[in-house]
Image (tube, helix red, strand yellow):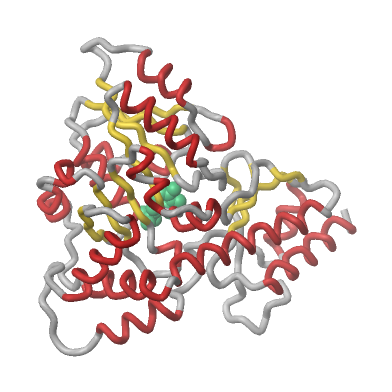
Amino acid sequence: MNNNADRHPPPQFASDTYAGICPEALEALARANEGHAPAYGDDPWTARATALLRDLFETDCAVFFVPTGTAANALALAALCRSYHSVLCHADAHIQTDECGAPEHAAGGIKIVPVPGAEGKLTPDLVREAASKRRDVHSHKPGVLSLSQATEAGTVYTVQELRALGEAARALRLRLHVDGARFANAVASLRLPPKALTWQAGVDVLSFGGTKNGMAFGDAVVFFDGALAEGFEYIRKQAGHLLAKMRYVAAPWAAMLESGAWLRNAEHANAMARELETGLRGVDGVSILYPVQANAVFVQMPPRWVEELHRRGWHFYTIAGGERLMGSWDTEPQDVEAFLKDLRNVAAHS
Ligand SMILES: *Cc1c(COP(=O)(O)O)cnc(C)c1O
């Protein structure tokens, strides 16, 4: 067992989805749980959270809350695509590897086109090449470029990279979707206003994650081009993703934005990943696979060490060619130290 017996159950580095609900979100849930309120998003919390997101992005965006990130991505892509369109994305993109074909299902038969790229990222050249391979009627019509920010490899697109990809997409007549399940971690990493990473770089739609940031559930689909949001309320309802008691998603969102917890949580999770990285670099036999720019560290180490760490009670997953260790809003420095202590111990006895 790891040394954090005082925390029940012990903290883990498996995923930011293993962490519970942060205090700001939990208190907001309790406060919203008073009496009756209009259902299906006609409540004051949904109006407030929507207004706060418009303030955050400094634009009059259209906002729709959905229960999961998969729903956010699938329905956003359904709004952008006709059934004959394709969506270009990184080969490790969540929409390609982890959504059970939800976007293809929601959008009535679209094709996801996975494009390999270094460190979880795509480049304008890779996008141009993928989009121009075939343009005939027998293939499919490239309709959307979907980027993950932060990426599945724990890296972050710079604003220059995003702008270049936005320009490439525009030139190819592709809409630009961003899977921001960890958008907060990217903002915390780059320390830039959210508008610089979205509409100012040509992003049409953002799936903005709340779950991994410290909420119980609930992600936001944010349209920066109002025309693209037309009919989206029907797409959401038809898919069964319009929550009747919407206030339980919206109230935590409003509280997270108002208190600044959304950014603090992400900064903290990122800092814990950096601390883990620093410690891991000091262990012979461990190598870091990708630049640590958000809240994930990908490492390679001997399989026997992985087995032994699992045996000692540490959960983590083998993903994208390495072991993925993730910081969360509630990871504490002593958790990092406990993990490193066990790892050093395992390494010393190998
Ligand atoms: C977690 C995640 C999602 C959404 O996952 P859900 O389990 O459906 O909430 C989407 N994209 C990325 C990159 C993710 O890591």
Q: Residue at x 48, y 41 (%)?
A: 159
Relative side of 145 to 267, left or right: left
Taking the image as shown, residue 205 lies to the left or right of residue 333, namely: left
Horizontal and vertical percent for residue 5?
67, 81
35 relative position to 96: left or right: left
Vertical placement of 154 versus 273: above or below? above
Relative to 135, is 190 above or below?
A: below
Work out whether residue 1 can be spotted: no
What residue is at 66 percent from the left and 84 percent from the top? 6
**Is any part of residue 9 visible from this angle?**
yes
44 over 118 or under it: above or below: below
Whole-percent x, y for residue 27 in the image? 37, 84
Q: What residue sits 64% from the left and 42% below the top?
A: 290
Could you tell me which quadrant the N terminus lies in? bottom right
Point 28% across, 41% down: residue: 204
Q: In the picture, residue 128 is in which quadrant?
A: top left
Q: State the residue in front, 51 or 307.
A: 51
